[in-house]
Image: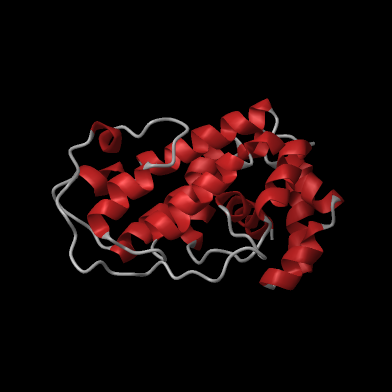
Amino acid sequence: MFEALLWAFILAFAGLSVAQIEPISYNVLPIRAGPPSTLSQCANPPVDDCSFYATCLESRYQCGPNGYPIGYGQHFCQKFSDERDLLDAQGQEWMVNTMHCLQKVLVGNAIDAQATTCTALSHQAFGSHAECYLKNGVCTLGPHDWEAIFEIVGIKTLFKSWDAFKSSFEAAAGCGAFFAWVVENDLFQDLERRQGVDNRRCARSSNRLLMDTE
């Protein structure tokens, strides 16, 4: 299933490393949300900067080290930023734009008078991933960048929020080259082992997608 492959790739970029982290639970409720931030950097997150998660979200919601702001957003934003040299110029530009997109989606949670919860925050954040990755051109990157992303973070699991991804993917175009690269590099086997992907369904999706690009 191509949707599964691309979503796994998206999560790989986001930082779900197989060997380096323990399973993290993001459905954590704060004891009490603080007041909205009045900092300019929370209303307009700086480009190529990961401090938004701690300064603007964690300071208000106190989701803790396993909550989305610290345990996912900041952790993997910083990890990928630290290893950006593995990407070429286009890949680095995509990374910076995607990280910024992910933060802008959450600005309202930092500055609006009406607070949310840590659970709702994590759901909203994960639901925005597919749109940000696709909008910033994940499928237009070349094999060097795709390989680097897998090398940096690996693949661990599919995220449970399928609807947001599927609707974004259906509106996307130009992902044939990426999918062909996945097939060529025999990544189905790894995905099938880790995520229970049906290889025959993947193959059928492969044929349909590749025919669309001819």
Q: Residue at x 62, y 39 (%)?
A: 138
Residue 144 horizontal/vertical position (percent): 77, 37
Q: Nearer the viewer, residue 139 or 19?
A: 19
- For the C terminus, give its image quadrant: top right
* Above or below, 198 relative to 186: below
- For the N terminus, give its image quadrant: bottom right
Q: Nearer the viewer, residue 19 or 91?
A: 19
The quarter of the displayed image where residue 139 is located: top right
For residue 151, side relative to residue 24 (left or right): right
Q: Residue at x 62, y 54 (%)?
A: 12
For residue 116, side relative to residue 68 (left or right): left
Residue 186 horizontal/vertical position (percent): 84, 57
Residue 151 horizontal/vertical position (percent): 73, 50
The quarter of the displayed image where residue 45 is located: top left
Residue 197 horizontal/vertical position (percent): 70, 69
Q: Residue at x 39, y 42 (%)?
A: 51
* Above or below, 48 relative to 193: above
Q: Residue at x 30, y 50 (%)?
A: 57
For residue 88, side relative to residue 78 (left or right): right
Q: Is residue 168 visible?
A: no
